[in-house]
Amino acid sequence: MELWQLDIVGGIQLADGGEAKVVTGVDDHSRFCVIAAVVRRATGRAVCLAFAEALQRFGVPDEVLTDNGKQFTARFGRGGGEVMFDRICRENGITHRLTKPRSPTTIGKVERFHQTLQRELLDDVEVWADPDEAQAAIDVFRHEYNFERPHQSLGMAFPADRFTAEPPEEQLPLQVPPTLATTIPAPRRPLPAPAAPGPAAGQSTVTAAPATSDDVGLAVEVTRLVPTSGNLTVCGQQFWLSPTRAGLPVTLWADTTVVHLLINGVRLKTVPSRLTPAHLRQLLADDGQPAGPPPITTGPVQAGGPIEVDRLVNATGLIGLAGRQHPVGYHFAGQRVTVRLDRSLMQITADGVLLRSLPSPLTPAETTSIRDARPAGPPPTPASEPVRVERRVSCRGSLVIAGQRIHVGITHARATLTVEAADTTFRIHDGDQLLTEVPRTTTKPIARFKVRKPEPPRLPGDNAASKQPDPKEKP
């Protein structure tokens, strides 16, 4: 924990017409988000309070890096001097480093966190009721970002796997100005695991009762409507579903281990459960019902058995498995898929339908090291429709798919055609017109699904080397 990057971002429009800000902080080494505090006004006191709470929770870093905002420094203020943020750094032995003026890329890691926060959360909500509602949604987003979201710059590892809080025995008493000391919680929490959120306003608390034999294997199904904020709260546990699903009924299959969230019978995601047996009994007493079989199998993974993991395909068609990135097809970019690994076979599925089969890139040892794997369910169902891909015809009237060359005629040169790839044939279409159907003679997998963008023809003057004077030529 050597360096934190800190910054402030806006974009939270409130119902009263104001705009709240978010004080953010990211650990430089692990990309672990250490600060994500919503404030009505980003004053120096509000920023320092968020910073001091992070120091109280995770320990003191060696250095912090910020821009030249007046909350962080008086570098460009009248008279100079020391602001409260500088004082906290000085009294706790933290080196405060500043970026050069107009150089936002120096704090590029926290800026990149802002981009993800903006795209995946803040842009989905036009108006927030109050800062507390925004803070609750950001807390859920932050937990998923730190603990459940693989990071490309970390080799698809989780930020929580790389982040190490300062051990309690090495922590010194935190030195803060007296005006802040009364507002910071006294106990220090060295571990980065967030505390379970408390009950929402107007929601009754549950008094824990001793577990009984009836609680063993207790599971509940309950249906709730997604609120306008997209942040659903059930018995104190929050589930982020996005405002785009506001008003939709979502079914929760919950026990004390996992919670599955489904809409119209389709599983959206599975998250660790923070519900106690008392919470489950309360849901049953309200409008819940005893749950049937879970939508997916969970539990310990058997050595050598097939496993499943959920992954989000990134913009370049890659997924992260066992600390490495593996291509599955960029036409799946942005889609959440289930990866089924069975010995030497890797199957990409969505909603139980097989999208693609590939050779498994992992060794048995790497397969067992996948953190969030679960026992695989039944094999996926093959897609009812053949795979459709695009190919551009060459100037000689042929195209190539899966290593097989197919001649379609010189009249279609440079045209983009659609190829239906079945098990035994290739069917070539020009729009709705079937041009030809040929037997499939290759067993290679299809690696490209979209046509490449054609390069513009090069002119003699476009060659940069040709514009350079010949050193041997006399002037």
Image (cartoon, rainbow, N blue to C red):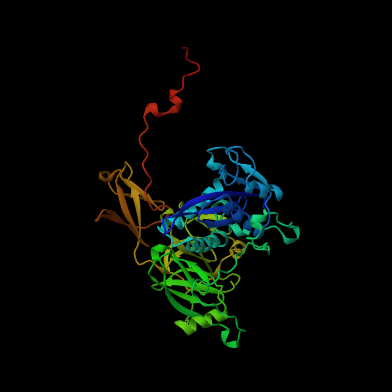
- Residue at image location 55% in from the left, 75% down from the top: 275
How many numbered tags mark residues here? 0
Residues 13 and 147: in front is 13
- Say if residue 289 shows up in the picture: no
- For this orientation, the residue located farthest to the right is 169
Q: Where's residue 10, x and y in %?
A: 48, 51
- Say if residue 354 shows up in the picture: yes
Residues 338 and 175: in front is 175
Q: On the rendered structure, is 145 left or right of 448?
A: right
- For this orientation, the residue located farthest to the left is 433
**Where is 400 relative to 357, above or below?**
above
Q: Where's residue 189, x and y in %?
A: 67, 63
Q: On the rendered structure, is 419 left or right of 378?
A: left
- Residue at image location 51% in from the left, 53% down from the top: 41
Residues 248 and 316: in front is 248
Q: Where's residue 169, x and y in %?
A: 75, 60
Image quarter of residue 183:
bottom right
- For this orientation, the residue located farthest to the bottom is 213
**Where is 418 relative to 301, above or below?**
above
Q: Where's residue 167, x and y in %?
A: 72, 59
Residues 425 and 113: in front is 113
**Where is 414 relative to 358, above or below?**
above
Image quarter of residue 352:
bottom left
**Where is 216 relative to 374, above or below?**
below
